[in-house]
Amino acid sequence: MKKIYKATNFYYFKICITILLIALACLLYIFFFSALGFGFLINTIVAGIFIIISLFIIYVVIISNKPVIIIEKDTLTYRYKKLPFSEIEAFHISRGGSEPYILTKEGKRIDLELSWLKKQDQLEIEETLQDRLKNG
């Protein structure tokens, strides 16, 4: 029994806007730097550095923030990390706009960003985690 929960389309819209803003900031900085008149070689080097930095930031934004939750028979996968249910000590549901979180037996707190998921999926995930932890 494997259940996959993915983000809504609004999350992908947010990622696109973030990428566009990073690209715009990079272009504006390059244009500003080239307007200072330091010469073609220095402007090209600075533009290359800013493009590389911008591409790296875009890569990090896309990879690190993907809110996908996979619930399998014995494990919970969240943001590329597999967590066996046997390692979960407690699960705290969301209250008053806060995100739910998991406490592991090692004392580590893992916040589940469920706000990017559909409301029905959020409730289903919370119910499933509560049931799994009750029944052990």
Image (cartoon, rainbow, N blue to C red):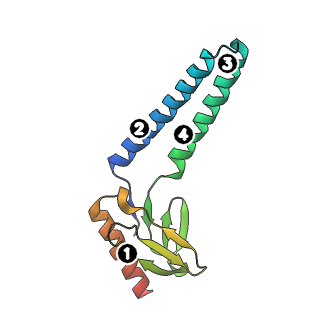
Q: Label 4 sits on what residue type?
A: Ile
Looking at the rendered structure, the kind of residue marked 3 is: Asn
User: Foreground residue, 39 or 87?
Assistant: 39
Amino acid beneath label 2: Ile
Q: CA distance from mark 1 to mark 3?
A: 52 Å
For the residue labelled by badge 3, is the local secondary structure a helix, a strand or a loop?
helix
Residue 98 % position (x, y)? 38, 67
Q: Say which residue appears at 57% left-offset and 81% top-offset.
A: 105
N-terminal-most mark, 1 or 3: 3
Residue at 64% in and 23% down: 47
Given residues 29 and 72, the one toward you in this image is 29
Residue furthest out toward the bottom: 135
Residue 66 placed where, x, y %? Answer: 47, 52
Separation of residues labelled 1 and 4 (CA atoms)? 32 Å
Q: Residue furthest right?
A: 41
Question: Badge 3 local density, few (<14 within 10 Å), some, or many (20+)?
Answer: some
Rendering coords of residue 119 (x, y %): 28, 62
Q: Nearer the viewer, mark 3 or mark 4?
A: 3
Residue at label 2?
17
Q: Which residue is mark 1?
A: 93
Q: Real-space Cα distance between discs 2 and 4?
A: 11 Å
Asked if disc 1 and disc 3 are in contact, CB closer than 8 Å, the reply is no
Residue 110, placed above or below residue 115:
below
Dot 3 or dot 4: first in sequence order is: 3
Label 4 sits on residue: 58
